[in-house]
Amino acid sequence: MTETRPRLREKYEKEIVKQLMEEHKYNNIMQVPKLQKITINMGIGSASSNQKELESAFKDLTKISGQKPVITKAKKSIASFKVREGNSIGCKVTLRGARMYEFLDRLLNIAIPRIRDFRGISRKGFDGNGNYTLGLREQTIFPEVDLEDSQIVKGMNITITTNIGSDNDSLSLLEKFGFPFKK
């Protein structure tokens, strides 16, 4: 049984590496930035009072990522948010390898074009170390999520971790993958 390689991984290895080596004048192929992992996080603020919301988010994140999420717990008690230490407050999943590239392909080519009134992704999501975080307001832009099953619309944070320490190099890599940044 032969395993098919994700389309974006093929594009990265055949086109993007060569373009980045010419553009940034890297001496060695190991200097070229690459994706390490993608982390998807859904925080459910009212999960402590409504367990069904957490279950719904868990199912949606499983469908979106193709992998079983981990339920996150509160590290501290915060009285003003009615959160106690150890309460379930959300779920997250970390994607690596083929699943990471397949998710990124679906995000760029299917989900982002379905966002209403879309004008581009902000360039301000970089953290100074070459990692980019994108916030989405609703999970229903992914075609895997059934609108009838989802009880409420939940947002999510998608963090793309690269191996390079520079925001400019990371921005260049993400632009080559096809991220529609604002001009």
Image (cartoon, rainbow, N blue to C red):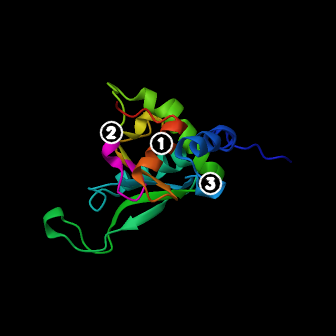
> In this picture, is 102 found above or below 82?
above
Residue 120 visible? The answer is yes
Q: Amino acid at mark 1?
A: Ser
Q: Quick one: label 3 or label 1, which is nearer the N terminus? A: 3
> Which residues are drawn in magenta?
122-133
Q: Helix, strand or loop at disc 2? A: loop
Q: In the displayed image of the protein, which residue is found farthest to the top?
A: 117
Q: Residue 5: percent from the left, percent from the top?
A: 72, 44
Closest to the observer: 27 or 2? 27
Residue at image x 18%, y 62%? 81
Q: Amino acid at mark 3?
A: Asn
* Disc number placed over residue 172 in the picture, else none: 1
Q: Quick one: label 2 or label 1, which is nearer the N terminus? A: 2
Q: Is residue 161 left or right of residue 14?
A: left
Q: Residue 162: percent from the left, percent from the top?
A: 50, 55
Residue at image x 53%, y 31%? 109
What residue is disc 3 on?
A: 27
